[in-house]
Image (spheres, rainbow, N blue to C red):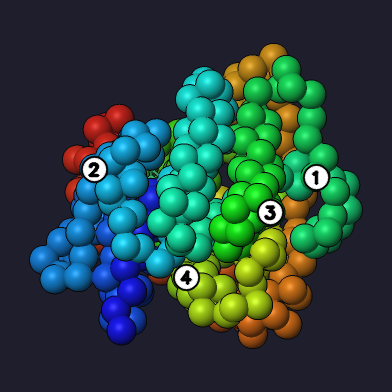
Amino acid sequence: MKEKIVITGGAGLIGSHLSRELLDDGNQVMAVDDLSQGKVDNLKDLMEHKDFSFVQSNILDNQNLEECCSGASTIFHLAALKIPRYRGYLKTLEVNAKGTQIVLDCARKIGARVIFASTDDVYGKNPDSLVSEESSLVLGDSQITRWSSAASKIYGEHLCFGYAEKYQVPITIIRYSGVFGSTFQLSSLSGVQDLLIVSALTQRALPIHGDGTQTRPFTFIEDAIDATLRIWRTASTDGEIVNIGTGTQISIINLAYLIWRFVGINENIQLNFIPYTDFSHLYEDPRHRKIDISKAKYLFGYQPKISLENGMQMQVEWFKNNLKKIQKLNPSFSTN
Ligand SMILES: NC(=O)c1ccc[n+]([C@@H]2O[C@H](COP(=O)([O-])OP(=O)(O)OC[C@H]3O[C@@H](n4cnc5c(N)ncnc54)[C@H](O)[C@@H]3O)[C@@H](O)[C@H]2O)c1
């Protein structure tokens, strides 16, 4: 039987790919997104699908969200704002914290399950070389506003457990780690790989925050969606937190070299080092982050298949083929 599934943030990177896979699986999908970051173009091929609908709405509009969710068995709650490096802390807190409570309230009323997208950024400054779901969440000073997004996701995780305890809402928390893949949106909140690729393709110096020796994990979208669907199908993930990534990492400077090579520019690489003080006089970024994905492996057989190099090569090719449209949709990236 067809299940109705609602995806908040459905026009974003993960939401649009998840919509496609859930439709292919024979479900009825409703994507809800205010398009503050996501693009309708991410869903263009789905618009004519008889089991797909898109609603442009802010999740903070609880009445509208309740109408959208009516009859849904699962809500994938992906709508959120990412790390606000330059500004927008209050909006981030509002959308991520208040928005998650509205989604959970909605799930309580209609008896739906919630799969909540959290982030590996909740591990913050934890100095361990490998962080698992049981590791401590170590955020910096509240004056360092960059932590607002991680703080709001931690609050969202607690809300999930609160609604599970008080109202028996079935919940699962996914801590995604550096997911990348095809998307038409490009902004200061975009993943570093997209900003590096577009800079290289438009012959601009590649922006590197700090000295570039910090390492980051990268997970190709196909693996992230495979894990998400496995979680959805596995009853024993109820009440669990799961790290989803690949467990591999690369320094940002090496990522810049890799992308430069894949773009195929036969000249010396141009790098633009941006000091952290440009974001704020108080700024912090984790030096390294490596997540342990063994829980996902043992609980539901997740095994990432796409290597970082193969994934990045596909990402560069996709951006090459879609650059004009990306520039048109995101005018601030259109000049050389
Ligand atoms: N991509 C990653 O690497 C990554 C890593 C960790 C966590 N996550 C989490 O996974 C989820 C999806 O990430 P993504 O990469 O697809 O991000 P994304 O920015 O591509 O998608 C989020 C979507 O939410 C929408 N949105 C924002 N505020 C909204 C609001 N008030 N009402 C309705 N829609 C709203 C945006 O327009 C966007 O389309 C997010 O919750 C994110 O925090 C992603």
Q: Mark 4 falls on what kind of element?
A: helix
Q: Assess whether mark 3 and mark 2 are in contact (beta carbons under 8 angstroms).
A: no
Does 172 appear above or below 80? below
Mark 2 or mark 1: which comes first in sequence?
Answer: 2
The image position of residue 105, as x and y in percent, is 49, 45
Question: Which residue lies at the image location 72% right of the left edge and 70% below the top edge?
Answer: 293
Q: Nearer the viewer, mark 3 or mark 4?
A: 3
Residues at marks 4 and 2, CA–CA distance in whole angstroms: 23 Å
The image position of residue 210, as x and y in percent, is 68, 33
| Residue that label 4 marks | 225
Q: Assess whether mark 4 and mark 3 are in contact (beta carbons under 8 angstroms).
A: no
Mark 3 or mark 4: which comes first in sequence?
Answer: 3
| Residue that label 3 marks | 165
Amino acid at circle 4: Ile
The image position of residue 243, as x and y in percent, is 68, 63
Amino acid at circle 3: Glu
Question: Which residue lies at the image location 58% right of the left edge and 63% below the top edge?
Answer: 170
| Residue that label 2 marks | 56
Is 131 displayed left or right of 265 in the figure?
A: right
Residues at marks 3 and 1, CA–CA distance in whole angstroms: 22 Å
Q: Callout 3: 10 Å neighbours few (<14), some, many (20+)?
A: few
| Residue that label 1 marks | 137
Question: Which residue lies at the image location 64% right of the left edge and 55% below the top edge?
Answer: 164
Residues at marks 1 and 4, CA–CA distance in whole angstroms: 25 Å
Amino acid at circle 2: Gln
Q: Mark 3 falls on what kind of element?
A: helix
